[in-house]
Image (spheres, grey):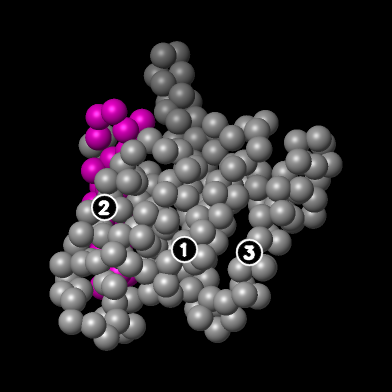
Amino acid sequence: MMALFSKKYSGIISRQKIIGILKELFRKSIHLCSAFVPCFLWIAYKPTIACLFALVVFYSAAEILRLNGKEVFLISAVTEAAARKRDENKFVLGPVTLVLGIILSAILWEKLPAAIGIYALAFGDGLASLAGKLFGRIQIPFTEGKTVAGSLTCFSAIFISCYLACFFMFQGQTDITKVSLIIAGAGMLIEILPLKDFDNLFIPILLGGLAQYLLC
């Protein structure tokens, strides 16, 4: 009897873990899509900013309607599929902070620093929690569940994306390896902090500002 109960309980835990990983994969695929934004900003800056603002307004309206029992085609379904357990029956703030972080980074900083901040958000933050879910065994104390695997993934992703962005776009004499290491280290420290959805704001803005200071 106990063996059957244990087997059933183990199966429930496994299913919950798989569902959690699938949700995280879906959420982070949205994060990764933000890596296309710098291209649109270079091609058509003002229309892209306008579209991003419109997206925030439209999503916010859809969320308010969803919380009042009125589903909005596709948007509400995507939100529910991507929402974490802590977001149940609440306004899902993540997409708003994600887009606002991108907008503010694009407005505050020059093209390359803004792109570095956005790439850090897309790849660093985007892959960190997914790696933590899949491979995280050692948790970092006082970080509300952040893992060593996630933090190392964040550092590596930011370093590579920053280095490549500088390599292809930057014409100065600055040591881009050193710059990339500094930005990756700062990004990892920000990602470790238990900021919840607000890391979407801090990562692109702070790292974009740091990149502008180091490169300009």
Residue located at (55% from left, 33% from top): 85
Viewer-proximal residue among 34 and 205: 205
Helix, strand or loop status at disc 3: helix
Q: Is residue 52 left or right of residue 42?
A: right
Q: Is residue 23 visible?
A: yes
- Give the crowd class for mark 2: few <14, some 14-19, many >=20 residues within 10 Å: some
Percent position of residue 157, x then y: 30, 62
- Which quarter of the figure has residue 147? top left
102, above or below 81, in the image: below
Viewer-proximal residue among 177 and 82: 177
130, above or below 209, in the image: above
Q: Quadrant of the C terminus?
A: bottom left
Percent position of residue 39, x then y: 50, 78
Residue located at (37% from left, 54% from top): 206
Helix, strand or loop status at disc 1: helix
Residue farthest toward the right in the current orientation of the protein:
70
Range of residues picked out in magenta? 140-164
Q: Is residue 21 visible?
A: no
Most common SS among magenta residues:
helix
Q: Which mark is residue 186?
A: 2
- What is the C-alpha distance between the residues marked 1 and 3? 15 Å
Q: Which mark is residue 108?
A: 1
Viewer-proximal residue among 112 and 196: 112
Percent position of residue 120, x then y: 37, 61
Residue corresponding to mark 3: 52
Answer with mark 1 or mark 3, whichever residue precedes in sequence.
Answer: 3
In this view, the mark in front (1 or 3): 1
199, above or below 10, in the image: below
- Asked if the magenta segment contains residue 148, the reply would be yes
Answer with mark 3 or mark 2, whichever residue precedes in sequence.
Answer: 3
Q: Which mark is residue 139?
A: none
Please name the amino acid that badge 1 sits on.
Leu
